[in-house]
Image (cartoon, rainbow, N blue to C red):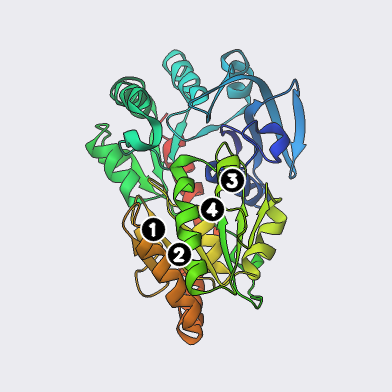
Amino acid sequence: MNILMVPPYAPPSKHNPSGSEGGSERFCFNLSKSLMQRGYKVHVLTSSHDNTEYEVVEGVPCRFSRNWWQMLKVNPLAFIYDKLPHEVDWADVVHVHSYIYFMGCQVALYRKKRRFPFILHLHGGTAPITWKVYGHKSVAAKIVYDASLGKWGMRTADAIMSCSHADAYNAVNRFGVDPARVVQIPNSIFVDDFYSNPENPPIITFLARLVHLKGCYLIPDIIRRVHQKRGDAKFWIIGKGYAESYLKENLRGLPVYFQRSVPYSEVMDVFAKSSVSYLPSYTEGTPLTVLESLAARVPVVASNVGGIPEIVQDGETGYLTEVEDTKEMAEKIVYLLNNEEERRAMGLKGRKFVKEHHDWGATTKKIEDVYRRFLKRV
């Protein structure tokens, strides 16, 4: 079987003008590698900030279109419509990652012209967004987009894969998708790649894009509160984004280590050295960074939004807090630092949960089954 993947970007970061890798891109490439290991042929069609046309990335053949502009700072304006006839001729299945991207809309448009198995994968973003994060104009634009192109794109797809129950619910109840076409596919990682070797003094880690959506403007208050109670703790902030200068300005004098990005092959080392990770996001799908933290036996303190409560069991593998409640998030981080035995027990439960429900072996098989099911219908 030949499979065409369409994510917004491709690792490494030189192809990504925002400078950091998102969860949908990582999911796409890990899935591609897992499928190739099973004997499938995979091509990726995506964007690049330069004039690169073709390159093999992490062993996966990639064809690129020039990204001319960033819409809402995340959505690449890359034109792939003229490349689709050739790629669709080759592919048995076209698998698009995330409904909101301009490239996915082009695939949906071409699907109206020609029949082919079109799978649309939701990685978050289906819920309404808050004006505090994006501003009133962006909120209005998303309302209009969701009600028009977003709904049209979802209804054009033969199947909707969703990384979380929250996105699956929104697909049916906000976008009017037939429930029979929605398939729950857990976000997954290669669990056995992760290990635990926490350092002393303890390290508290934030690993994500440095943008408002991820709660980055809340981080200085969280770190100050934790530092007041645990002056021996160190803080790692790993990622790139427009909030980087704000964070550096407002965290001067504190024991904070910044690293703009790390290759995926080094993410395991980051979490292995960590004691606690946190994610104060305003909205999420099922973030890979949370699964990676849990796989390394590192409890997570995160916002109770999107698909996060599906993978962080409050009081069992970490803690959930309300959005913008920096006081509670800091207190939970301090509690975990002060109670090492409980922290280690949570870490063991977290790894067990991820191994049982979010390892690539079972997930790839589920996706293969969806491909075959919808291939027969078209």
Q: Which residue is mark 3?
A: 249
Q: Which residue is mark 4?
A: 364
N-terminal-most mark, 1 or 3: 3
Name the element at disc 1.
Answer: helix
Alpha-carbon distance for marks 2 and 1?
A: 8 Å
Neighbours of disc 2 within 10 Å: few (<14), some (14-19), many (20+): many
Number of dots carrying numbers: 4
Alpha-carbon distance for marks 1 and 4?
A: 37 Å
Q: Is residue 10 above or below residue 256?
A: above
Which amino acid type corresponds to the residue marked 1 in the rendered image? Answer: Thr
Alpha-carbon distance for marks 1 and 3?
A: 19 Å
From the viewer's side, name the closer residue of 348 and 61: 348
Residue 242 located left or right of residue 357: right
Residue 52 located left or right of residue 277: right
Label pair 2/1, CB-CB below 8 angstroms: yes
Q: Is residue 203 above or below residue 19?
A: below
Image depth: mark 1 or mark 4 in front? 1
Q: Which residue is mark 1?
A: 326
Label pair 2/3, CB-CB below 8 angstroms: no
Which amino acid type corresponds to the residue marked 2 in the rendered image? Answer: Arg
Name the element at disc 3.
Answer: helix
Q: Which residue is mark 2?
A: 225
